[in-house]
Amino acid sequence: MKGLIVLICSVLTLSLVTVLVGLLSTQKKVRQYLEMPAYVGPVPEHVRSAIIARVPLGSSRQNVQDFLSSRGIGKDGDSSCEEGAVDGVIICSVGAQNHAWQPIREIYTFSFEFDSDQRLRGVEVRSRVAGP
């Protein structure tokens, strides 16, 4: 009986560690992309501020695309970017890739909205936890 309890505790501990590693690895990647200091929590408000500090509202669409490309966002296999269904939107996701060792992960979505002159009108950042 004692062995079964030890086994169950070990499995639960391993599961918890795996979940935490999955969540923290995505947060680390977001910090790297945006050069955010470790002491700044990667909550959507802070991530949005970090993006706008690098590509201010009013920036051209090309400036936003250059920023994303220079940081590897959408090009490195850990993230993706695509044109949204609505004209004038670029949507990027970080952490959406499903890895067997990362059954639960945090996904960040950055949405860049442009006006009719292709100037950055708004940036929205969302974070959610997803499973298999």
Image: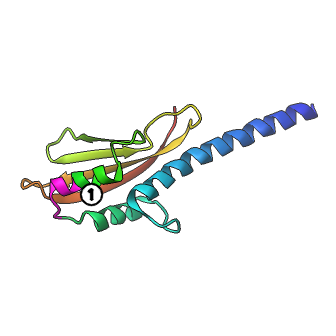
Query: Residue farthest to the front?
Result: 70
Q: Amino acid at mark 1?
A: Val
User: 126 or 53, which is in the foreground?
Assistant: 53
| Number of numbered discs overlaid on the protein picture | 1
Please report the residue visible at 46 percent of the width from the left and 60 percent of the height from the top. Answer: 42
Left or right, residue 77 beside residue 8: left
Image quarter of residue 13: top right
Residue 100: x %, y % from top left: 56, 31
Residue 62: x %, y % from top left: 17, 53
Please report the residue visible at 64 percent of the width from the left and 41 percent of the height from the top. Answer: 18
Left or right, residue 32 beside residue 74: right
Quarter of the image containing the N terminus? top right
Residue 68: x %, y % from top left: 29, 52
Image quarter of residue 12: top right
Q: Which residues are magenta?
A: 58-64
Circle 1 sits on which residue? 123
Q: How is the image coloured?
A: rainbow
Left or right, residue 123 beside residue 6: left
Task: Answer whether residue 94 is magenta in the image.
Answer: no
Please report the residue visible at 43 percent of the width from the left and 54 percent of the height from the top. Answer: 30
Q: Secondary structure at mark 1?
A: strand
Task: Answer whether residue 60 is magenta in the image.
Answer: yes
Task: Judge whether 12 appears above or below 116 on screen.
Answer: above
Left or right, residue 62 beside residue 26: left
Please report the residue visible at 16 percent of the width from the left and 64 percent of the height from the top. Answer: 58
Query: Residue farthest to the left?
Result: 117
Residue 117: x %, y % from top left: 6, 56
